[in-house]
Amino acid sequence: MQFPSKLIEDAVNGFATLPGIGKKTALRLVMHLLQKDEKDTQIIATAILKMRNEIKFCKTCHNVSDDDICSICNNSYRDKSVVCIVENFRDIIAIENTRHYNGLYHVLEGLISPMDGIGPEQLNIESLLKRIKEDEIKEVIMALNPTIDGDTTIFYLSKVLAEYSIKITSIARGIAFGGELEYVDEITLARSIQSRLPYENYMTK
Amino acid sequence: MQFPSKLIEDAVNGFATLPGIGKKTALRLVMHLLQKDEKDTQIIATAILKMRNEIKFCKTCHNVSDDDICSICNNSYRDKSVVCIVENFRDIIAIENTRHYNGLYHVLEGLISPMDGIGPEQLNIESLLKRIKEDEIKEVIMALNPTIDGDTTIFYLSKVLAEYSIKITSIARGIAFGGELEYVDEITLARSIQSRLPYENYMTK
């Protein structure tokens, strides 16, 4: 693609480094910015620069945060005896949006993956053990993706955590709400039969 | 959607003002920037800011440009007797990419649209007439979208340009390369029969 201007070309190439944005889409975004006020471009550029430069990670749970300790760890209304282990902060946003969890989190920043050469020492497991030793944590919930890496990580963590007297649970795997039995894969269906619930627990509360 | 940080929220809202990018996609882009080096964010933000602040519009043809006169108007190898009229600079990029046009351009920056209250005085028509009077232009090619607004603009321009002794042409409308006759709409099919070409002109050169 040829561009009439080096400035346009640089801006298009900039946008095109983002995932899911190709050169044509990038050009459409640049066109949009050109048609809008200069101030609008300023707002977007400042927001992403400020975000990237000033973002901090919570010293307790490694969630993204504006301060040293994130708003969830700092919230005195939250149940400090339960810690939900997630892969990254996007999962925290997803769980928070359900408004059905009131405990704390711990972000691993990855999953154990022998294929990609990621071992337990590269994840935030040390700081998790420190929390378990120092804070009064009664339950750890594994909320990791149901993949091979996720299951490997859960297996590793459950071994490591076995020596502490805490309850270890995992989010339920089963048929998604609105899902149809005949299209569900066999592993999920088998697991959902194995971990069947009494009828009283079945209804959404 | 709740965000763990005001900085993230601002960045997501910034991206989400762009066309075709919703909050979920914006969050994915922000996540991507967080995983990459700080320098990468700097490059993108600087490129779009610089583009928006420093971009100029060619004083002759209103194309986007790094200088007062764009690289196409400044190119001495281009045929200065032909001017192709387009709606915006994206159309110039599209035509340039064909590598089959060697004349100049004139960007109207819009189309006449009575429905949207856009009249000829809001488009770059004054400067087009100035060029026709002062430069040695022999042919004007209308390369406008085949819509009601496009056809209205062509009709208006052909009236205005009638008093000058120049040739007025329009890009051919017809069946697209690779298109199938049975799925083509009636107006296009009818036009392509009316403006049929001798066989020698038909083959792509």
Image (cartoon, coloured by chain):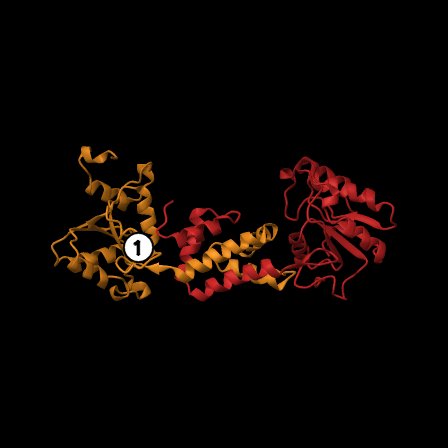
Chain colours: A red, B orange
| Image quadrant assignment for residue A157 | top right
Q: Nearer the viewer, residue A86 or A189?
A: A86
Examine the rendering and report whether any part of residue A32 can be seen: yes
Locate residue B84, reporting x and y percent. Answer: 24, 51
Examine the rendering and report whether any part of residue A195 can be seen: no
Subunit ID for the residue under disc 1: B
Locate residue A191, reporting x and y percent. Answer: 74, 39
Residue at (25, 66) in percent of width and height: B121
Q: Is residue A185 left or right of residue B16?
A: right
SS at badge 1: loop
User: What residue is disc 1 on?
Assistant: B70
Image mark count: 1
Where B162 sits versus B101, above or below?
A: below
Locate residue A165, reporting x and y percent. Answer: 88, 50
| Image quadrant assignment for residue A185 | top right
Residue at (77, 54) in percent of width and height: A83
- Amino acid type at image mark 1: Cys
| Image quadrant assignment for residue A205 | bottom right
Residue at (33, 36) in percent of width and height: B178
